Every structure is written in C-alpha cells, then in structure tokens.
Amino acid sequence: MKPGARGDLYAVLQIVTPSVISEKEKQLFEELAISASFDPRAHLTGEPSHV
C-alpha cells in the first residue's frame, strides 16, 4: 500500500476479566461505579459522557 493510501483497519481485541473477585474488590468496583462520571453507554441514550 502506498504511503497515505486509505484502506481497512482490522484489529483483534482480547478482553480479560477476573473470573473470581474478593468481597473487597467487589466493594471497590461498586464504589467506582457510583463515583465515576464516565458513562461508556452514554452515546446510546444521547446523554453526554461527562458531568
């Protein structure tokens, strides 16, 4: 492909999540969910992703 040419970009993502978490980790994730201002699904409802 020539420099500056346009084309398709293919990417492979591997998302790894823990299969087991401790009660403390669960509590911390829940606190983060409550206090975080970022909403990764905001574009689905049309709402802004920040406060």
Image (cartoon, rainbow, N blue to C red):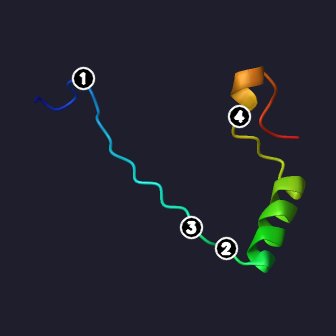
Asked whether 42 or 5 is in front, the reply is 42
Report helix, strand or loop for mark 4.
loop
Q: For mark 4, what is the residue?
A: 41
Q: Earlier in the sequence, mark 4 or mark 1?
A: 1
Q: Quadrant of residue 51?
A: top right
Determine the CA span between mark 3 and mark 1: 40 Å
Q: Percent position (x, y) of residue 23?
A: 79, 76
Report helix, strand or loop for mark 1.
loop
Q: Nearer the viewer, mark 4 or mark 2?
A: 2
Q: For mark 1, what is the residue?
A: 6
Q: Nearer the viewer, mark 4 or mark 1?
A: 4
Residue drawn at point x = 40 percent, y = 53 percent: 14
Amino acid at the residue labelled 4: Arg
Asked whether 38 or 41 is in front, the reply is 41
Determine the CA span between mark 4 and mark 1: 30 Å
Report helix, strand or loop for mark 2.
loop
Report helix, strand or loop for mark 3.
loop
The circle on residue 19 is 3
